[in-house]
Image (spheres, rainbow, N blue to C red):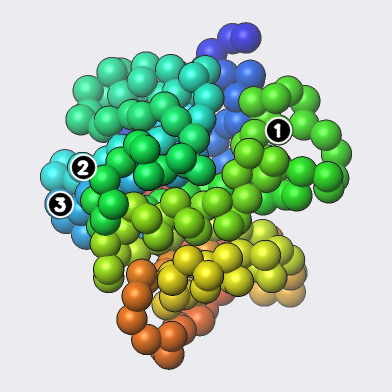
Amino acid sequence: MPRTLERLPNGLVLWQDDAYFKLGQDSVLLAAFARVRPRDRVLDLGCGTGALSLLVYRPGLQITGLELQEGPLSLFRTSIAENDVPISTLQGDMRNIRQLIPHGSADHVICNPPYFASAAGKSAASPAHAAARQDAACTARDVASAASFALHTGGRLSIVFRPERLWVLLPALHEAGLTPKRLRFVHQNAGAPPSAALVECRKGGSAEGLAVEPPLLVASEEYQQIYGK
């Protein structure tokens, strides 16, 4: 498949290939939503070709991308070399997270997971696309469990999900000891239903105090600023 080079809003570049899931709006908006602090140890669960890791990158962060498939991970490594940034990669299945990384070793976990149930919707064009879109190899419960293991108490998970499937995500987060603290919906415009939900959770602590933030409108100046326009 032909490869293309995408310039990201933060100035870094991302190598892409039609064989793998490509950069979309959700990763860009999640990167802007995530409050990653200076010198955080960041784990990108199911990193794919690395768009989310590259979008949140800034000097001082310790970022590791964990990915099941070798193909997209290899392309991510090409982007890392192209940008000359110190991001680490790890191939493995997040369902085996206990054999891959130390417990409590992350300050912040970021994730743009598969949204759809494996039996729902149109079949993906390839196994690589199916893994990125459908939850056969990575359910909401798998993500929540892996994030909880990786995070120390007080650490945070930032995740994007389909609003109509929050009924799947929220119980999984609760079971894993992850408490939603911020929630923001993305809308095409003020009259449209939400197309994405941005959620920040904290491991441990009180279940009180969920902040539902003003909606992010695609037809807004803020959205244009996120894209650097």
Instruction: State which quadrant residue 147 falls in.
Output: bottom left
Q: Residues within 10 Å of mark 3 (few under 14, many from 20)?
A: few
Residue 16 appears in the rendering: no
Task: Report the mark closest to the observer, 1 or 3.
Answer: 1
Residue contact between numbered discs 2 and 3, judged by CB atoms under 8 Å: yes
| Residue for badge 3 | 39
Callout count: 3
Question: Would residue 216 be found to the left or right of residue 193 on screen?
Answer: left
Please tell me which residue lies in front, 125 or 58. 125
Amino acid type at image mark 3: Arg
Q: How far is disc 2 from disc 3 in space, using C-alphas?
A: 7 Å
Label 2 or label 1, whichever comes before in sequence order: 2
Spot occupied by residue 26 in the image (x, y as percentages of width and height): 55, 50
Q: CA distance from mark 2 to mark 1?
A: 29 Å
Mark 3 element type: loop
- Verify CB contact (< 8 Å) between mark 2 and mark 1: no
Residue 117 in percent (x, y) is at 75, 49
- The amino acid at mark 1 is Ala
The N terminus appears in which quarter of the rendering? top right
Q: Is residue 161 above or below residue 76?
A: below
Q: What residue is drawn where x is 50% and y is 81%?
A: 212
Q: Which residue lies under the disc numbered 2? A: 62
Q: Of the numbered discs in the image, which one, if any, rests on residue 226? A: none
- Judging depth in this view, the residue of 63 and 176 nearest the camera is 176
